[in-house]
Amino acid sequence: MDGFMTDEFFEKLPKNLRSILFDDSGSYFEFYRALKGGILHLGVSGEKLFTLLEELNQTDPDLSKKLISFVDSGKLKGLKTEKEIHPKIDLSGIRKGVLRQLSGCYEHDADTLIHDELEQKSWIEKLEAEGQKPLFLDENFTNGNIEYLFKEQSKFLNVGDPFNWSRFLMQYVLPFNRVRILDPFLFVNIRETDLPGILKSISKKSKHGIKVEIISDLSAQDKWTSKEVLERVQTELKDFKSSKIDIALYDQKGGGKDLFHKRVVWTDFWALYTDRGFDFLDIEKGGGTVKRENTLFISGKYASKDSVWHQIEKNWNGYLEKADLITS
């Protein structure tokens, strides 16, 4: 099995080499598609490629030697013009070798696995449960099924559209250990949000030990007291009992009102966010109807380092410091 590259790997590459290996957003996706397609062709001359690898030798000699060895063996080529790899080229052995050697450059264990020789797709669920990390097949790269991990995607919702959290989230459900929710109006709008439905959906592939942290504002409006809002939240969650989920509720302090403009549900591998809140449904049994136009965005862990996912990951502890723990 092979793993996705970590940020540590990305940082080791000199900027000019990064601009060739990755797309404009800094996404790993195009690089992986190239690797999974066979030999990686770069749009530069062979001489320029060698110069770039020599520059890399100054910051990471071991990685430079590995990449140079790919050049020597023909796995990595420099060309004056872009060249499309013929779809019939079958170099699965080389592809696996390249990724396996790249994975040896990690500073940390890969948190996502890929494989191209599973005899039965039914094994995936079992392996995910045992390893508590996502497992993808090669075909997931070519058919675009996991592109959301590398590039932001969006879904526009019109008034009157039927909407069901389970159906929407099923394509994004992975084994999760952490879920973070940040929405100042979540508590006061708890009955229009279907929080139990969201949590039930995203926990389907997780075996145990999901830590859910929710930051919202008990005083976001004057219609109810903070105590009344908290009682409504606890009532909404009381029937949602799961041995694998531990929920901690936090109330924003006065100085935390402008923590983050977007409302977001963050997981280990992606962030779901919207500018207009998650209370966009008239709740019905099994789903709901959109009552207010909205756009949902999915931003993956392997997208740009300035993405919403990375913003939440970087600043979450600071958000908690500006909130009071209500219950856990």
Image (spheres, rainbow, N blue to C red):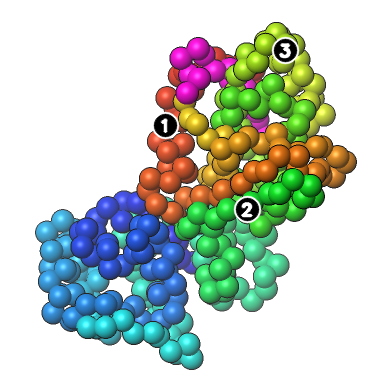
How far from the left and from the top, in percent, is residue 119?
A: 64, 76
Q: Is residue 264 visible?
A: no
Q: Are marks 3 and 1 in contact (CB under 8 Å)?
A: no
| Magenta span | 243-258
Q: Above or below — where is 165 with respect to 227?
A: below
Query: Where does label 3 land, which residue?
Result: 223
SS under mark 1? helix
SS under mark 2? strand
**Amino acid found under the numbered disc labelled 1:** Asn
Quadrant hosting residue 187 = top right
Badge 2 crowding class, 10 Å Cα cut-off, few under 14, some 14 to 19, many 20 or more, is few
Q: Are marks 1 and 2 in contact (CB under 8 Å)?
A: no
Q: How many marks?
A: 3
Query: Where does label 2 land, which residue?
Result: 155
Q: Is residue 296 left or right of residue 321?
A: right
| Foreground tag (3 vs 1) | 3
In magenta stretch: residue 244: yes
Query: Where does label 1 land, which residue?
Result: 315
Q: Residue at x 57, y 41 (%)?
A: 273
**Amino acid found under the numbered disc labelled 3:** Lys
| Foreground tag (1 vs 2) | 2
Q: Is residue 270 left or right of residue 85?
A: right
Badge 3 crowding class, 10 Å Cα cut-off, few under 14, some 14 to 19, many 20 or more, is few
The foreground one among 266 and 43 is: 43
